[in-house]
Image (spheres, helix red, strand yellow):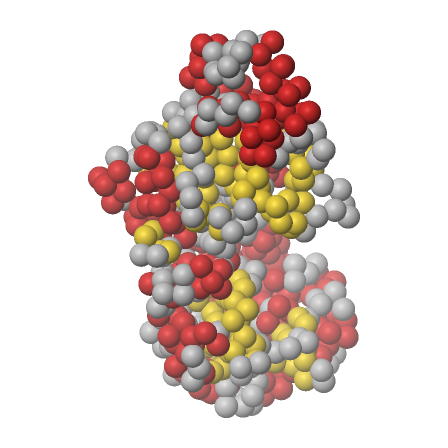
Amino acid sequence: MNIQEMELMNILKCHSYKRQRDLSEVSGYSLGKVNSMLKSLTEQEYLDEKLHLTEKARQLYEMHRPKQAIILAAGSGMRMVPINVEVPKGMLEVKNEPLIERIICQLREIQVTDIKIVVGFMKEQYEYLIDKYNVILVFNEHYATRNNLYSLAKVKECLENAYIIPCDIWCEESPFSSFELYSWYMVNEQEDEESMIKINRKRELRTVGEMENGNRMIGIAYVCTEEARRLKKKIEEMTGYKRYNHVFWEEAAFVQDRMLFYPKVVSSQKVFEINTLEELRDLDENSDQLNSELLDIISNTLSCDLKEIVEIEALKKGMTNRSFRFRCKNKRYIMRIPGEGTGEMINRSQEYNVYQVVGKEGICDPVCYINPDNGYKITEFLENARVCDPMNPRDVKRCMDYLREVHQKRFEVEHTFDIFLQIEQYESYWKGEKSIYRDYIETKNKMYELKRYIDSQEKEWTLTHIDAVPDNFLFVNDRIYLIDWEYAGMQDPHVDVAMFAIYSMYDRDKVEELIDAYFENHCPEEVRTKIYCYIAVCGFLWSNWCEYKRICGVEFGEYSLRQYRYAKEYYKIAKERISHE
Protein backbone atom coordinates (compact mmCIF):
# COMPACT_ATOMS: atom_id res chain seq x y z
CA MET A 1 0.00 0.00 0.00
CA ASN A 2 1.45 3.38 -1.00
CA ILE A 3 0.97 6.76 0.70
CA GLN A 4 -1.83 7.83 -1.63
CA GLU A 5 -3.78 4.65 -0.92
CA MET A 6 -3.31 5.04 2.81
CA GLU A 7 -4.55 8.64 2.64
CA LEU A 8 -7.63 7.46 0.76
CA MET A 9 -8.19 4.76 3.39
CA ASN A 10 -8.14 7.43 6.11
CA ILE A 11 -10.74 9.46 4.24
CA LEU A 12 -12.99 6.42 3.93
CA LYS A 13 -12.58 5.64 7.63
CA CYS A 14 -13.83 9.09 8.54
CA HIS A 15 -16.65 9.35 6.02
CA SER A 16 -18.79 6.87 4.11
CA TYR A 17 -18.43 8.23 0.60
CA LYS A 18 -20.33 6.29 -2.03
CA ARG A 19 -19.29 8.14 -5.17
CA GLN A 20 -15.79 8.19 -6.60
CA ARG A 21 -16.34 11.77 -7.71
CA ASP A 22 -16.87 12.85 -4.08
CA LEU A 23 -13.68 11.08 -3.06
CA SER A 24 -11.85 12.87 -5.86
CA GLU A 25 -13.00 16.26 -4.62
CA VAL A 26 -12.13 15.54 -0.99
CA SER A 27 -8.76 13.89 -1.65
CA GLY A 28 -7.57 16.21 -4.40
CA TYR A 29 -6.68 13.26 -6.63
CA SER A 30 -8.07 12.92 -10.15
CA LEU A 31 -11.08 10.72 -10.72
CA GLY A 32 -8.96 8.24 -12.66
CA LYS A 33 -6.39 8.07 -9.83
CA VAL A 34 -9.15 7.51 -7.26
CA ASN A 35 -10.67 4.67 -9.32
CA SER A 36 -7.26 3.03 -9.68
CA MET A 37 -6.58 3.24 -5.93
CA LEU A 38 -10.01 1.90 -5.00
CA LYS A 39 -9.44 -1.06 -7.28
CA SER A 40 -6.04 -1.73 -5.70
CA LEU A 41 -7.39 -1.46 -2.13
CA THR A 42 -10.22 -3.84 -2.98
CA GLU A 43 -7.82 -6.34 -4.50
CA GLN A 44 -5.68 -6.14 -1.35
CA GLU A 45 -8.87 -6.85 0.65
CA TYR A 46 -8.80 -3.59 2.61
CA LEU A 47 -12.14 -2.51 1.04
CA ASP A 48 -15.24 -4.44 0.10
CA GLU A 49 -17.42 -3.80 -2.95
CA LYS A 50 -19.35 -1.08 -1.06
CA LEU A 51 -16.11 0.76 -0.21
CA HIS A 52 -16.36 -0.21 3.45
CA LEU A 53 -13.27 -1.08 5.47
CA THR A 54 -12.78 -4.82 5.87
CA GLU A 55 -11.70 -6.74 8.99
CA LYS A 56 -8.19 -6.79 7.53
CA ALA A 57 -8.21 -3.00 7.39
CA ARG A 58 -9.54 -2.73 10.94
CA GLN A 59 -6.75 -4.98 12.18
CA LEU A 60 -4.23 -2.79 10.38
CA TYR A 61 -5.60 0.30 12.10
CA GLU A 62 -5.49 -1.44 15.47
CA MET A 63 -1.86 -2.39 14.85
CA HIS A 64 -0.96 1.29 14.26
CA ARG A 65 -3.27 2.85 16.87
CA PRO A 66 -1.67 5.72 18.89
CA LYS A 67 -0.67 4.51 22.35
CA GLN A 68 1.66 7.14 23.78
CA ALA A 69 3.20 10.57 23.30
CA ILE A 70 6.53 12.28 23.93
CA ILE A 71 6.67 16.04 24.44
CA LEU A 72 10.10 17.63 24.08
CA ALA A 73 10.37 20.50 26.58
CA ALA A 74 13.96 20.51 27.81
CA GLY A 75 15.47 23.44 25.90
CA SER A 76 15.75 27.00 27.12
CA GLY A 77 14.32 28.44 23.92
CA MET A 78 17.03 31.06 23.44
CA ARG A 79 15.12 32.63 20.56
CA MET A 80 12.29 33.42 22.99
CA VAL A 81 14.31 36.13 24.71
CA PRO A 82 13.54 37.91 26.94
CA ILE A 83 10.57 35.76 27.99
CA ASN A 84 12.70 32.62 28.32
CA VAL A 85 14.34 34.12 31.39
CA GLU A 86 11.03 34.04 33.23
CA VAL A 87 9.27 30.89 32.00
CA PRO A 88 10.20 27.80 29.94
CA LYS A 89 8.84 27.84 26.42
CA GLY A 90 6.26 25.11 27.08
CA MET A 91 4.63 27.39 29.65
CA LEU A 92 4.04 30.26 27.25
CA GLU A 93 0.36 31.13 27.35
CA VAL A 94 -1.77 31.63 24.26
CA LYS A 95 -5.38 32.62 24.86
CA ASN A 96 -4.92 32.04 28.62
CA GLU A 97 -3.70 28.47 28.18
CA PRO A 98 -0.12 27.16 28.48
CA LEU A 99 1.10 25.62 25.23
CA ILE A 100 1.94 22.32 26.86
CA GLU A 101 -1.47 22.01 28.53
CA ARG A 102 -3.18 22.52 25.19
CA ILE A 103 -1.06 19.73 23.69
CA ILE A 104 -1.85 17.40 26.62
CA CYS A 105 -5.58 18.09 26.39
CA GLN A 106 -5.61 17.45 22.64
CA LEU A 107 -3.85 14.12 23.23
CA ARG A 108 -6.31 13.14 25.95
CA GLU A 109 -9.20 13.85 23.58
CA ILE A 110 -8.06 10.85 21.53
CA GLN A 111 -7.49 8.76 24.68
CA VAL A 112 -3.70 9.04 24.62
CA THR A 113 -2.89 9.38 28.31
CA ASP A 114 0.57 7.77 28.43
CA ILE A 115 2.47 11.04 28.06
CA LYS A 116 6.14 11.57 28.82
CA ILE A 117 7.57 15.09 28.94
CA VAL A 118 11.33 15.47 28.62
CA VAL A 119 12.29 18.48 30.73
CA GLY A 120 15.47 20.36 31.54
CA PHE A 121 15.45 24.16 31.67
CA MET A 122 13.19 25.37 34.53
CA LYS A 123 12.02 21.78 34.96
CA GLU A 124 10.29 22.63 38.24
CA GLN A 125 7.62 24.65 36.42
CA TYR A 126 6.34 21.45 34.79
CA GLU A 127 6.01 19.52 38.06
CA TYR A 128 2.32 20.36 38.60
CA LEU A 129 1.43 18.50 35.40
CA ILE A 130 2.16 15.21 37.16
CA ASP A 131 -0.81 15.72 39.48
CA LYS A 132 -3.07 17.48 37.02
CA TYR A 133 -2.67 15.10 34.06
CA ASN A 134 -0.79 12.07 35.42
CA VAL A 135 2.11 12.65 33.01
CA ILE A 136 5.67 11.40 33.53
CA LEU A 137 8.56 13.89 33.62
CA VAL A 138 11.92 12.70 32.29
CA PHE A 139 14.94 14.90 33.08
CA ASN A 140 17.55 15.56 30.39
CA GLU A 141 20.63 16.62 32.34
CA HIS A 142 22.36 17.68 29.10
CA TYR A 143 19.70 20.20 28.09
CA ALA A 144 22.11 23.16 28.25
CA THR A 145 24.89 21.64 26.14
CA ARG A 146 23.17 19.28 23.68
CA ASN A 147 20.27 19.44 21.29
CA ASN A 148 16.98 17.55 21.38
CA LEU A 149 18.41 14.35 19.90
CA TYR A 150 19.50 13.68 23.48
CA SER A 151 16.03 14.44 24.81
CA LEU A 152 14.57 11.79 22.53
CA ALA A 153 17.36 9.40 23.52
CA LYS A 154 16.09 9.60 27.12
CA VAL A 155 12.79 8.01 26.02
CA LYS A 156 13.95 5.92 23.07
CA GLU A 157 12.19 2.84 24.50
CA CYS A 158 8.83 4.64 24.15
CA LEU A 159 8.76 5.41 20.42
CA GLU A 160 6.41 2.70 19.16
CA ASN A 161 3.03 4.06 18.06
CA ALA A 162 3.95 7.37 19.62
CA TYR A 163 3.57 11.05 18.81
CA ILE A 164 6.70 13.19 19.11
CA ILE A 165 5.77 16.80 19.82
CA PRO A 166 7.81 19.95 20.46
CA CYS A 167 6.38 21.97 23.34
CA ASP A 168 6.41 25.32 21.51
CA ILE A 169 3.60 24.44 19.08
CA TRP A 170 0.09 25.90 19.05
CA CYS A 171 -2.47 24.07 16.91
CA GLU A 172 -5.82 25.68 16.24
CA GLU A 173 -7.26 22.21 15.59
CA SER A 174 -5.89 19.04 17.11
CA PRO A 175 -3.24 17.44 14.88
CA PHE A 176 -3.78 14.09 16.58
CA SER A 177 -6.14 11.28 15.64
CA SER A 178 -7.53 8.21 17.36
CA PHE A 179 -6.36 6.24 14.34
CA GLU A 180 -3.16 6.33 12.33
CA LEU A 181 -2.00 4.16 9.46
CA TYR A 182 1.58 5.17 8.80
CA SER A 183 4.51 7.13 10.23
CA TRP A 184 4.46 10.80 9.32
CA TYR A 185 6.30 14.05 9.93
CA MET A 186 4.46 17.36 9.84
CA VAL A 187 5.42 20.19 7.47
CA ASN A 188 3.48 23.08 6.03
CA GLU A 189 3.21 24.46 2.52
CA GLN A 190 5.60 27.37 3.08
CA GLU A 191 9.15 27.38 1.76
CA ASP A 192 11.86 27.71 4.36
CA GLU A 193 15.53 28.24 3.60
CA GLU A 194 16.49 26.71 6.98
CA SER A 195 14.58 23.48 6.34
CA MET A 196 16.47 20.27 5.55
CA ILE A 197 13.56 18.44 3.88
CA LYS A 198 11.29 18.79 0.88
CA ILE A 199 8.32 16.81 -0.46
CA ASN A 200 9.17 15.20 -3.77
CA ARG A 201 6.85 13.96 -6.54
CA LYS A 202 6.58 10.53 -4.92
CA ARG A 203 5.19 12.14 -1.76
CA GLU A 204 8.40 11.40 0.15
CA LEU A 205 10.43 13.66 2.40
CA ARG A 206 13.92 14.05 0.99
CA THR A 207 16.88 16.25 1.87
CA VAL A 208 17.07 19.53 0.00
CA GLY A 209 19.85 20.43 -2.39
CA GLU A 210 22.37 23.17 -1.57
CA MET A 211 20.46 25.81 -3.56
CA GLU A 212 16.93 24.65 -2.63
CA ASN A 213 14.46 25.75 -0.01
CA GLY A 214 12.58 23.06 1.86
CA ASN A 215 9.11 22.80 3.36
CA ARG A 216 8.72 24.51 6.74
CA MET A 217 9.35 21.84 9.40
CA ILE A 218 6.76 21.80 12.19
CA GLY A 219 8.37 19.10 14.32
CA ILE A 220 5.33 16.96 15.17
CA ALA A 221 5.66 13.33 14.11
CA TYR A 222 3.89 10.01 14.47
CA VAL A 223 6.05 6.88 14.64
CA CYS A 224 4.75 3.38 13.94
CA THR A 225 6.43 0.22 15.22
CA GLU A 226 8.77 -0.55 12.32
CA GLU A 227 10.05 3.01 12.01
CA ALA A 228 10.33 3.28 15.81
CA ARG A 229 12.78 0.39 15.89
CA ARG A 230 14.90 1.90 13.15
CA LEU A 231 14.78 5.33 14.76
CA LYS A 232 15.80 3.93 18.13
CA LYS A 233 18.79 2.12 16.62
CA LYS A 234 19.93 5.27 14.83
CA ILE A 235 19.57 7.37 18.00
CA GLU A 236 21.70 4.88 19.92
CA GLU A 237 24.39 5.06 17.24
CA MET A 238 24.42 8.87 17.00
CA THR A 239 24.44 9.66 20.72
CA GLY A 240 27.67 7.72 21.03
CA TYR A 241 29.54 10.48 19.15
CA LYS A 242 30.21 14.05 20.26
CA ARG A 243 29.77 15.36 16.72
CA TYR A 244 26.02 14.84 17.15
CA ASN A 245 25.77 16.88 20.36
CA HIS A 246 24.09 19.78 18.61
CA VAL A 247 21.82 18.08 16.08
CA PHE A 248 18.06 17.82 16.12
CA TRP A 249 16.37 14.45 16.50
CA GLU A 250 15.11 14.62 12.93
CA GLU A 251 18.60 13.80 11.64
CA ALA A 252 18.22 10.33 13.14
CA ALA A 253 15.12 9.80 10.99
CA PHE A 254 16.98 9.71 7.69
CA VAL A 255 18.14 6.76 5.63
CA GLN A 256 20.64 8.33 3.27
CA ASP A 257 18.69 11.23 1.69
CA ARG A 258 15.15 10.04 2.54
CA MET A 259 13.22 10.43 5.77
CA LEU A 260 11.70 7.34 7.34
CA PHE A 261 8.34 9.15 7.54
CA TYR A 262 5.81 10.29 4.99
CA PRO A 263 4.88 13.98 4.96
CA LYS A 264 1.80 15.29 6.69
CA VAL A 265 1.06 18.72 5.26
CA VAL A 266 -0.88 21.28 7.31
CA SER A 267 -1.82 24.87 6.65
CA SER A 268 0.48 27.56 8.01
CA GLN A 269 -2.70 29.23 9.27
CA LYS A 270 -3.60 26.25 11.47
CA VAL A 271 -0.36 25.28 13.22
CA PHE A 272 2.04 27.81 14.69
CA GLU A 273 5.55 27.31 16.00
CA ILE A 274 6.32 30.02 18.56
CA ASN A 275 10.04 30.74 18.50
CA THR A 276 10.13 34.46 19.20
CA LEU A 277 8.34 37.07 21.25
CA GLU A 278 7.03 38.67 18.08
CA GLU A 279 5.50 35.38 16.93
CA LEU A 280 3.74 35.13 20.29
CA ARG A 281 2.58 38.73 19.99
CA ASP A 282 1.19 38.06 16.49
CA LEU A 283 -0.74 35.02 17.74
CA ASP A 284 -2.04 36.53 20.98
CA GLU A 285 -1.26 40.17 21.72
CA ASN A 286 -2.96 39.76 25.12
CA SER A 287 -0.77 36.89 26.30
CA ASP A 288 0.27 37.25 29.92
CA GLN A 289 3.88 36.54 28.95
CA LEU A 290 4.00 39.80 27.04
CA ASN A 291 3.79 41.48 30.45
CA SER A 292 7.47 40.77 30.95
CA GLU A 293 9.61 42.41 33.60
CA LEU A 294 12.44 42.76 31.08
CA LEU A 295 10.19 44.34 28.48
CA ASP A 296 8.93 46.76 31.11
CA ILE A 297 12.54 47.71 31.92
CA ILE A 298 13.20 48.42 28.25
CA SER A 299 9.97 50.37 27.92
CA ASN A 300 10.69 52.53 30.98
CA THR A 301 14.35 53.08 30.09
CA LEU A 302 13.72 54.09 26.48
CA SER A 303 10.33 55.73 27.12
CA CYS A 304 8.61 53.61 24.51
CA ASP A 305 5.49 51.52 24.09
CA LEU A 306 5.92 47.75 24.32
CA LYS A 307 4.85 47.41 20.69
CA GLU A 308 7.79 49.58 19.66
CA ILE A 309 10.22 46.89 20.90
CA VAL A 310 10.73 44.85 17.75
CA GLU A 311 13.27 42.71 15.86
CA ILE A 312 14.20 40.86 19.03
CA GLU A 313 16.88 38.23 18.44
CA ALA A 314 19.10 36.20 20.72
CA LEU A 315 22.80 36.74 20.31
CA LYS A 316 25.37 33.98 20.62
CA LYS A 317 25.43 32.74 24.19
CA GLY A 318 28.51 34.11 25.91
CA MET A 319 30.67 32.50 28.56
CA THR A 320 29.02 34.45 31.38
CA ASN A 321 25.79 36.00 30.08
CA ARG A 322 22.88 35.74 27.71
CA SER A 323 22.19 38.74 25.53
CA PHE A 324 19.62 39.77 22.98
CA ARG A 325 19.41 42.57 20.47
CA PHE A 326 16.30 44.57 19.67
CA ARG A 327 15.22 47.68 17.82
CA CYS A 328 13.32 50.60 19.28
CA LYS A 329 12.51 53.84 17.47
CA ASN A 330 14.88 53.10 14.59
CA LYS A 331 17.81 52.40 16.91
CA ARG A 332 19.24 49.07 18.01
CA TYR A 333 20.22 48.05 21.53
CA ILE A 334 21.57 45.03 23.40
CA MET A 335 20.19 43.79 26.69
CA ARG A 336 22.36 41.56 28.85
CA ILE A 337 20.90 38.93 31.17
CA PRO A 338 23.33 37.28 33.61
CA GLY A 339 23.86 33.58 32.97
CA GLU A 340 23.94 30.47 35.16
CA GLY A 341 25.98 30.82 38.34
CA THR A 342 26.96 34.46 37.83
CA GLY A 343 25.16 35.64 40.95
CA GLU A 344 27.89 34.02 43.02
CA MET A 345 30.79 34.85 40.72
CA ILE A 346 30.21 38.54 40.00
CA ASN A 347 29.33 41.36 42.39
CA ARG A 348 26.85 43.40 40.37
CA SER A 349 26.98 46.35 42.74
CA GLN A 350 30.73 46.61 42.19
CA GLU A 351 30.21 46.33 38.43
CA TYR A 352 27.69 49.17 38.65
CA ASN A 353 30.29 51.35 40.37
CA VAL A 354 32.84 50.58 37.66
CA TYR A 355 30.43 51.70 34.94
CA GLN A 356 29.82 54.96 36.79
CA VAL A 357 33.54 55.64 36.25
CA VAL A 358 34.30 54.33 32.75
CA GLY A 359 30.88 55.18 31.29
CA LYS A 360 31.37 58.89 31.85
CA GLU A 361 34.69 58.75 29.99
CA GLY A 362 33.20 57.13 26.86
CA ILE A 363 35.57 54.18 27.14
CA CYS A 364 32.88 51.48 27.00
CA ASP A 365 29.82 51.08 24.81
CA PRO A 366 27.07 53.58 25.80
CA VAL A 367 25.15 52.19 28.80
CA CYS A 368 21.48 53.17 28.99
CA TYR A 369 20.56 51.06 32.01
CA ILE A 370 22.32 48.87 34.55
CA ASN A 371 20.82 47.28 37.65
CA PRO A 372 23.26 47.00 40.59
CA ASP A 373 21.23 44.15 42.11
CA ASN A 374 20.70 41.65 39.30
CA GLY A 375 23.09 42.82 36.59
CA TYR A 376 20.53 43.50 33.85
CA LYS A 377 22.08 45.96 31.43
CA ILE A 378 20.99 47.81 28.29
CA THR A 379 23.57 49.33 25.95
CA GLU A 380 23.37 50.95 22.56
CA PHE A 381 24.28 48.56 19.76
CA LEU A 382 27.36 49.82 17.98
CA GLU A 383 26.63 49.50 14.28
CA ASN A 384 29.40 48.30 11.95
CA ALA A 385 31.55 47.22 14.90
CA ARG A 386 34.06 44.40 14.74
CA VAL A 387 36.13 42.70 17.42
CA CYS A 388 39.90 42.57 17.56
CA ASP A 389 41.57 39.84 15.54
CA PRO A 390 44.29 38.50 17.89
CA MET A 391 46.21 37.16 14.88
CA ASN A 392 46.36 40.59 13.25
CA PRO A 393 49.43 42.48 14.58
CA ARG A 394 47.95 45.87 13.65
CA ASP A 395 44.75 45.13 15.57
CA VAL A 396 46.72 43.92 18.58
CA LYS A 397 48.96 47.01 18.57
CA ARG A 398 45.93 49.32 18.50
CA CYS A 399 44.34 47.42 21.39
CA MET A 400 47.49 47.51 23.50
CA ASP A 401 47.93 51.25 22.87
CA TYR A 402 44.33 51.85 23.90
CA LEU A 403 44.64 49.60 26.94
CA ARG A 404 47.76 51.41 28.08
CA GLU A 405 45.99 54.77 27.71
CA VAL A 406 43.11 53.52 29.85
CA HIS A 407 45.49 52.27 32.52
CA GLN A 408 47.34 55.60 32.53
CA LYS A 409 44.12 57.42 33.45
CA ARG A 410 44.50 55.87 36.93
CA PHE A 411 40.80 55.32 37.52
CA GLU A 412 39.86 54.25 41.04
CA VAL A 413 37.04 52.25 42.58
CA GLU A 414 36.63 50.99 46.14
CA HIS A 415 37.01 47.26 45.46
CA THR A 416 39.87 45.09 44.24
CA PHE A 417 40.09 41.94 42.14
CA ASP A 418 42.31 39.61 44.17
CA ILE A 419 43.37 36.77 41.86
CA PHE A 420 44.24 34.29 44.59
CA LEU A 421 41.14 35.09 46.61
CA GLN A 422 39.10 34.44 43.47
CA ILE A 423 40.89 31.13 42.90
CA GLU A 424 39.83 30.00 46.37
CA GLN A 425 36.33 31.37 45.90
CA TYR A 426 35.75 29.58 42.59
CA GLU A 427 37.05 26.39 44.15
CA SER A 428 34.57 26.78 47.01
CA TYR A 429 31.73 26.86 44.49
CA TRP A 430 32.48 23.26 43.52
CA LYS A 431 30.53 22.30 46.64
CA GLY A 432 32.84 19.53 47.75
CA GLU A 433 33.53 18.07 44.30
CA LYS A 434 37.14 17.32 43.46
CA SER A 435 38.89 18.86 40.51
CA ILE A 436 38.74 16.89 37.27
CA TYR A 437 42.52 17.29 37.00
CA ARG A 438 44.50 14.56 38.77
CA ASP A 439 47.43 16.86 39.65
CA TYR A 440 45.30 19.82 40.70
CA ILE A 441 46.72 20.16 44.23
CA GLU A 442 50.29 20.02 42.95
CA THR A 443 49.52 22.65 40.31
CA LYS A 444 47.76 24.86 42.84
CA ASN A 445 50.80 24.77 45.14
CA LYS A 446 52.95 25.91 42.25
CA MET A 447 50.67 28.91 41.71
CA TYR A 448 51.25 29.95 45.30
CA GLU A 449 55.00 29.69 44.70
CA LEU A 450 54.56 32.30 41.97
CA LYS A 451 52.47 34.43 44.33
CA ARG A 452 55.54 35.08 46.46
CA TYR A 453 57.37 36.50 43.46
CA ILE A 454 54.35 38.56 42.33
CA ASP A 455 53.93 40.03 45.81
CA SER A 456 57.59 41.07 45.89
CA GLN A 457 57.29 43.18 42.73
CA GLU A 458 56.42 46.86 42.60
CA LYS A 459 53.04 47.57 41.04
CA GLU A 460 51.04 50.53 39.80
CA TRP A 461 47.59 50.01 41.31
CA THR A 462 44.68 51.15 39.11
CA LEU A 463 41.29 50.09 37.77
CA THR A 464 42.02 46.97 35.70
CA HIS A 465 39.59 45.39 33.27
CA ILE A 466 40.54 41.77 34.17
CA ASP A 467 38.67 40.44 31.10
CA ALA A 468 40.52 42.54 28.50
CA VAL A 469 40.32 39.85 25.82
CA PRO A 470 40.16 40.41 22.03
CA ASP A 471 36.38 39.96 21.88
CA ASN A 472 35.91 42.88 24.29
CA PHE A 473 37.73 45.39 22.09
CA LEU A 474 35.30 46.80 19.54
CA PHE A 475 36.55 48.69 16.49
CA VAL A 476 34.00 51.23 15.27
CA ASN A 477 35.27 53.37 12.42
CA ASP A 478 38.36 55.16 13.82
CA ARG A 479 37.83 54.51 17.50
CA ILE A 480 37.92 51.64 19.99
CA TYR A 481 35.53 50.72 22.79
CA LEU A 482 36.48 48.38 25.62
CA ILE A 483 33.32 46.62 26.76
CA ASP A 484 32.17 44.14 29.47
CA TRP A 485 33.74 45.45 32.69
CA GLU A 486 31.95 43.03 35.00
CA TYR A 487 35.10 41.52 36.54
CA ALA A 488 36.95 44.85 36.81
CA GLY A 489 38.55 46.09 40.02
CA MET A 490 41.71 47.62 41.41
CA GLN A 491 44.69 45.49 40.41
CA ASP A 492 48.08 45.55 38.70
CA PRO A 493 47.20 46.65 35.12
CA HIS A 494 49.70 44.16 33.70
CA VAL A 495 47.16 41.45 34.54
CA ASP A 496 45.18 42.69 31.53
CA VAL A 497 48.10 41.88 29.22
CA ALA A 498 48.22 38.34 30.60
CA MET A 499 44.47 37.92 30.20
CA PHE A 500 44.62 39.02 26.55
CA ALA A 501 47.33 36.44 25.90
CA ILE A 502 45.64 33.42 27.46
CA TYR A 503 42.23 34.09 25.92
CA SER A 504 43.91 34.42 22.51
CA MET A 505 45.62 31.08 23.22
CA TYR A 506 48.97 32.58 22.27
CA ASP A 507 52.17 30.57 22.19
CA ARG A 508 55.29 32.04 23.77
CA ASP A 509 56.41 33.92 20.66
CA LYS A 510 53.02 35.61 20.41
CA VAL A 511 53.12 36.47 24.10
CA GLU A 512 56.49 38.17 23.60
CA GLU A 513 55.05 40.20 20.71
CA LEU A 514 52.06 41.18 22.85
CA ILE A 515 54.22 42.39 25.74
CA ASP A 516 56.40 44.38 23.32
CA ALA A 517 53.28 45.97 21.81
CA TYR A 518 51.99 47.11 25.21
CA PHE A 519 55.37 48.40 26.43
CA GLU A 520 56.45 49.74 23.04
CA ASN A 521 59.52 47.47 23.14
CA HIS A 522 60.66 48.82 26.54
CA CYS A 523 59.46 46.18 28.99
CA PRO A 524 61.80 45.66 32.00
CA GLU A 525 62.81 42.02 32.38
CA GLU A 526 61.38 41.68 35.88
CA VAL A 527 58.02 42.99 34.60
CA ARG A 528 58.12 40.48 31.75
CA THR A 529 58.74 37.72 34.30
CA LYS A 530 55.84 39.02 36.40
CA ILE A 531 53.54 38.86 33.35
CA TYR A 532 54.56 35.26 32.77
CA CYS A 533 53.57 34.59 36.39
CA TYR A 534 50.23 36.27 35.74
CA ILE A 535 49.67 34.10 32.66
CA ALA A 536 50.16 31.01 34.81
CA VAL A 537 47.98 32.05 37.76
CA CYS A 538 45.27 33.59 35.56
CA GLY A 539 45.16 30.41 33.49
CA PHE A 540 44.65 28.55 36.76
CA LEU A 541 41.99 31.06 37.82
CA TRP A 542 39.94 30.61 34.65
CA SER A 543 40.44 26.84 34.80
CA ASN A 544 38.75 26.93 38.22
CA TRP A 545 36.05 29.16 36.75
CA CYS A 546 35.48 26.63 33.94
CA GLU A 547 35.22 23.81 36.46
CA TYR A 548 32.45 25.64 38.28
CA LYS A 549 30.64 26.42 35.03
CA ARG A 550 30.91 22.74 34.10
CA ILE A 551 29.10 21.88 37.34
CA CYS A 552 26.42 24.40 36.25
CA GLY A 553 26.05 22.48 32.96
CA VAL A 554 28.16 24.75 30.73
CA GLU A 555 31.11 23.18 28.91
CA PHE A 556 33.91 25.17 27.23
CA GLY A 557 35.85 22.40 25.53
CA GLU A 558 39.40 23.31 24.48
CA TYR A 559 39.29 26.66 26.26
CA SER A 560 39.16 25.08 29.73
CA LEU A 561 41.93 22.59 28.93
CA ARG A 562 44.18 25.30 27.52
CA GLN A 563 43.76 27.45 30.63
CA TYR A 564 45.03 24.63 32.81
CA ARG A 565 47.93 24.09 30.43
CA TYR A 566 48.85 27.78 30.69
CA ALA A 567 49.10 27.35 34.46
CA LYS A 568 51.54 24.46 34.18
CA GLU A 569 53.59 25.58 31.20
CA TYR A 570 54.07 29.21 32.24
CA TYR A 571 54.89 28.16 35.77
CA LYS A 572 57.96 26.46 34.29
CA ILE A 573 58.82 29.49 32.16
CA ALA A 574 58.40 31.90 35.06
CA LYS A 575 60.43 29.75 37.45
CA GLU A 576 63.25 29.50 34.96
CA ARG A 577 63.32 33.28 34.52
CA ILE A 578 63.15 33.87 38.27
CA SER A 579 66.11 31.56 38.84
CA HIS A 580 68.23 33.65 36.46
CA GLU A 581 67.38 37.03 37.93
Q: Position of residue 158 (x, y in %)?
A: 42, 26
Instruction: Please determine whether, in this image, residue 434 is positioned above or below residue 491.
Output: above
In screen coordinates, is 395 left or right of 352?
right
Q: Residue at x 39, y 70 (%)?
A: 294
Instruction: Please determine whether, in this image, residue 217 is positioned above or below residue 474.
Output: above
Total number of numbered labels?
0
Of 34 and 163, nearer the camera is: 34
Of 401 and 242, nearer the camera is: 242
Q: Which residue is drawn at 48% across and 74% down?
A: 309
Of 94 and 504, nearer the camera is: 94
Q: Which residue is drawn at 36% across and 65% down?
A: 286
**Residue furthest left in the image:** 131
In screen coordinates, is 11 left or right of 209?
left
Quarter occupied by residue 496: bottom right
Q: Position of residue 540 (x, y in %)?
A: 51, 57
Q: Where is residue 343 in the image (x, y as percent from the top left)?
A: 36, 64
Instruction: Please determine whether, in this image, residue 193 is positioned above or below residue 54.
Output: below
Q: Is residue 176 visible?
A: yes
Quarter occupied by residue 499: bottom right
Q: Which residue is drawn at 71% across and 82% down?
A: 477
Q: Can residue 458 be seen in this view?
A: no
Instruction: Please determine whether, in this image, residue 358 is positioned above or below residue 372.
Output: below
Image quadrant where one finds the N terminus: top right
Q: Where is residue 6 in the image (x, y as percent from the top left)?
A: 56, 23
Image quadrant where one finds the C terminus: bottom right
